[in-house]
Image (cartoon, rainbow, N blue to C red):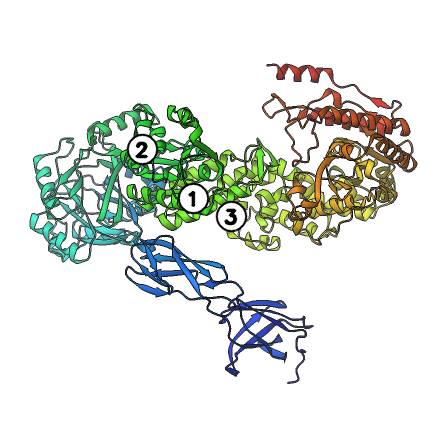
Amino acid sequence: MALELKAPQNFRVSGRDKSAVLSWDAVSGAAGYRMFFYDGNEPEKVMKARYAQGCSRTILGFTNGREYFAEVCAYVNRDGNEVLGERSKRVRFVPISLKLTAQKVVCLDLGETAQLFWEEANRVPQAQFVSDSPEIVSVDALGQVTGLSAGTANITITSENRQTFTTRVEVARSLSTRSSSAVMMFTGDIMCAVKQQRLGEGHQHDYHDTFRRVRSMLSGADLAVGVLETTSIDRAPFEFEQLRLHTGAPNCNSPSTFISAVAEAGFGALVTANNHNSDCGAEGLKAAADEIRRCGMQNIGSLGCNPVMISVRGIKVAFIAVTMITNNTGWDLSKSGFVNPNAAYSREYFTELVNAARGMGAEYIAAYQHWGVMNSARVRRSQVEEAQFMADAGADLIIGSHPHLVQRFSYIASADGRRVPCAFSLGNFLTTMNEMQGNRDSAVLRVELTRTECGISTRCSYIPCLTEDREWGEEIVPVYPPHSAESAASLRRTREAIGKRINCFAYRPKIFLSGSVLLGRIFSQGNGFRLDKTGMRLSQLSLGCAKAAPAEAVPENAEPRLRLDMCKDIAGAVKDSAPDYCAVDFYAAAALACWKFGGEVGEEPCFFSNYRGFRAAEWFKSERDSFTKINPPFGENIWKPLVKRYAEKLLSAVPGGRIILFRHQLNSKGAKGSELRNVPVKNNVNRFMRAMEDYFISIVHPMTVDLAGGYLMADSDGADYEPDYYLDCYKAAEKLTSGSGRTSVYIPDEEIWFGRVMKYYDSMTARAYQGWLLDMDCAADQLIAYTSVDFISRNCFRLMKLKRSGSTDLMYVREFFADDPGAGELISAAEIINALLNGHLDRSYEFFEPAFRGKYNILRKMVKLLSAEIGASVKEDSAELAFLLRGKQQMKRYVAALNRMTLDIWGSCVSRESANSSKDAYIGTYIFKQAPILAFENPVDLKLPEGAEAFCGNKWRRRTMQDSFLRSGDADIKGSESQWILLDMYDLICRMADYKGSLFEIDDFICRTDFYKSIQKDCRECFLFEKRDMKYCFEMITRFAKMILEKYGEHIILIKTEPKDRCITLDNRLEQLDDDGMYEIKKKFISLCEERFASVTGCYVIDISKHFYASDSFPLGGAHIVHYEDEFYRQTGEYITEILSGSSRHVFSTVDDNYLLLRNLRLKR
């Protein structure tokens, strides 16, 4: 077959470190490209082939210094086959690393030795090797490393050219040996008695709602086990149909639907060793066991299911169930085929079961025993004696049932020294019994197993529950916290009965806080933990010091935090506290100063935390001259040894699996109330904090919470987070301490995220900050951004479902919800948004009608398309009319009317927001960040980079800067067809940058761009009036005024913008603004320029800003442009409307006196 695809031209290959970078020119008609690689020693044999979609690829997997060849060809797919085109010429390349490189990670067993391999420019240079933890890994002069103890060490390799490389060496690393935990729950008797069956008959014996209040609790355990004290065979009379057997024994037979409801409640196994398991004979016993298995549960006890081995989160647990109580049912159970079908207890039988369990590899044995006296809260001697025997025989946990009341919980000392938990009776988990006051009380035993080096450890707690009557049947409800007088009485009875040897699961884990005040804010979000704040506010750099303060310097009555900071005994403090977990963060170490004491040459200094308690200490005051305050970041040679020692001290007191590291990251995006704003970024703090966190992790291997990247800062200093961050971290801590086995949380909580989107929605959409909270490549987030708050509220569940799916294309929303008849509104919105984003107005009115009715945000895109199409500015509230007028005769008249009400803007955001507040005004050309006095100066001699990457990805900012540099304002208005112009002079008093004599306006956003950073060394910040004298300014503002007058005639509106030194905060308080010392100068300068412009043009003047304060309710991204109270914009908008409609007056200076009166009264309250 003749080749149709030509060989790719300009094929280039560059060797890199163990890789190659390839590029070539595109081939017309190609579906993709194939690359072929050859070893220089075997040039005729293809060593590997790879595919590429585009015209460049980086391929890994080559050896540095070795010769290779490569060629490329295009291909097309034809009839399912790949047809290759003509191949390029072969190109030779040699991979090379110009920098020193070696293995990044080496893993060793204890005692194992390995050789490091290093190279530089394809040769092996002379090198020196240093281990930062020689007690863990040693390294000799030839680069051989040996693992001496478990842990992590970093080997620094230094070549003869002084280049360095660090290899991490892990010794005895095994993530699988991390302590694994499992949570099991055990309940007492589960019954379906006469009353419940009778009520259940009215709804087809559906008992699912009985468990609805405890379903999430039981399902949250790794395994839930209960005692099924009923049999279940649908072919025999149920208990409500026949109360007693012919022998007079109870007929505890329930519908099979009851067992399916128990399974759906979250149970994984049911105990059938009890005195009612054979109420329907061998057939009934077998039917119940079969139904248990059919519903996905394990049968424990009867019919030979003894012991039953279950792997609970990897821990092998054997379950044994026996009964000391049997009923005289009269049934012959020998037909079952089992020697002991109902699991009747004897010591010999129990010993056999324990031995069998150990033989099956059980790590833990849980034994159920049906014993005691019915309706008795007193534990009988026989129960105590048999519990002792069961513990001595090898049971690790004993759970009792049958008394129908809660009995005490205790620990039994076994013969081999084990401490065996024993719950003599957990009561009735589900019953209609009312014979005794406590018949309906129960305790769910919660057992947390943890595999440690010493075996399986056990932690027990209980959840008190109560069976309550409902019109439709019975319902089990937890009673902590109590919700009624009845539940409070039940809780009191259960607590008294079970005793003080076990805690209610309301037991709160204890957390030792070691780090900044951010930890305190996290754990103040709920009451689920007990806190020891001794280590809070203390820097790890202080606690990691080898030397402490002199013993005589520590006051005898020193409060615990000061004592810890001075004595440095973090291990002792944690051991004394005996916490369940330790929470750590490094913000205090990374961001706050320390006090250095001593530290002569060659001597390690001693650091102390900089907090009020230490500064108030007598020793600090008396030795003040010996202390030096030092600010972070600190050199690696200082902080690394201190963090390492701190980590080692901490590990000596609590295992790494019980340490939670909260990783923080300070953001440049912030929020105040519901308003989004920019805040100063603290990259140095972030880098230093991340370095310490990474090093700490390498030593400790803690659990981690890393959620900060998605959250906003809450103060102007950028040192505090929005409240939801702390809530999310708190919930993460709950997950990590729940026994679920999780070791890391790094994805923000979806419900919290959605709440934040709703909270900031108006500010986000008004300021086009969607990227702060939304992923604009995700279909769900696009729907959120381009619709409305009401739409989001109605469709929140479907939006969350779509987001979880990862769907990124609006075109597939219809297909995704194809089986959801209620998703029509969401599907329609997706198709509207997709059409408008792709510039399509060629759809029917009915197609777009939901957007008009719902006032979707995507109408902003529609008005741009309509404005371009009809040649006049369209506003969102008139988009529907403009759309319907398309192609109609009335359109010309409508466009003419629009043009009469369209005004250009030359000025700050004050003019723009004022125009937006006018119901009749339409914005035409908008000239922004171009101070009128600079309008006729030469362009700034700078070429802006292409694309938006150097401008934080913001294309609009790049265009604004480009227009500002070009001084394009005069050209822009000359090309405008608007009859009106709206101006303000605030740009005259904004910050400027002087670049080689040329001035341009800057703000915080511009200063953060990579472009500005690249020229910052050649710029000097200033104000315009510092660089241009008044004579020049007077002449330029006059020239500017004449130019505007020539273009717009009498259709000129000037908004006077008085600078402010005070603002109204979000909580309606008057606050002083930062004074740069230029306030009065700015005020006078702008006023002179405004008066000169007004006198030359005779324009309309709106002069009401003097009546208003600045407002903190609408920040403008740190642009240093004052934003006035909302009433200012409302009033200014009304004046603009009046002027456009034909006003006879030219000066507007009055405001609503009642508003001012009310505002002032609020501020004085």
Circles 3 and 2: CB atoms closer than 8 Å: no
Residue beneath the point at 62% across and 39% down: 764
Quarter of the image with the C terminus in it: top right
Return the disc, 2 or 1, that comes first in the chain's sequence.
2
Residue 801, label in figure: 3
| Amino acid on which the number 2 mark rests in the picture | Ala
Residue 973 quadrant: top right
Circles 2 and 1: CB atoms closer than 8 Å: no
Residue marked by disc 1: 639
Counting from the top left corner in percent of width and height, residue 813 is at: 58, 52
Viewer-nearest residue: 541 or 266 = 541
Residue 1032 quadrant: top right
Q: In this orientation, does residue 746 appear? A: no
Viewer-nearest residue: 10 or 603 = 603
Residue marked by disc 2: 506
| Amino acid on which the number 3 mark rests in the picture | Lys
Counting from the top left corner in percent of width and height, residue 756 is at: 54, 37
| Amino acid on which the number 1 mark rests in the picture | Trp
Q: CA distance from mark 2 to mark 1?
A: 40 Å
Return the disc, 3 or 2, that comes first in the chain's sequence.
2
Return the disc, 1 or 3, that comes first in the chain's sequence.
1
- Label 2 sits on a secondary structure element that is loop
Residue 658 quadrant: top left
Q: CA distance from mark 3 to mark 2?
A: 33 Å
Viewer-nearest residue: 989 or 1138 = 989
Counting from the top left corner in percent of width and height, residue 436 is at: 19, 28
Q: Give the side of residue 9 with respect to residue 1084, left or right.
A: left
For label 2, the crowd category at 10 Å Cα-Cα, with few meaning under 14, some 14 to 19 and many 20 or more, is some
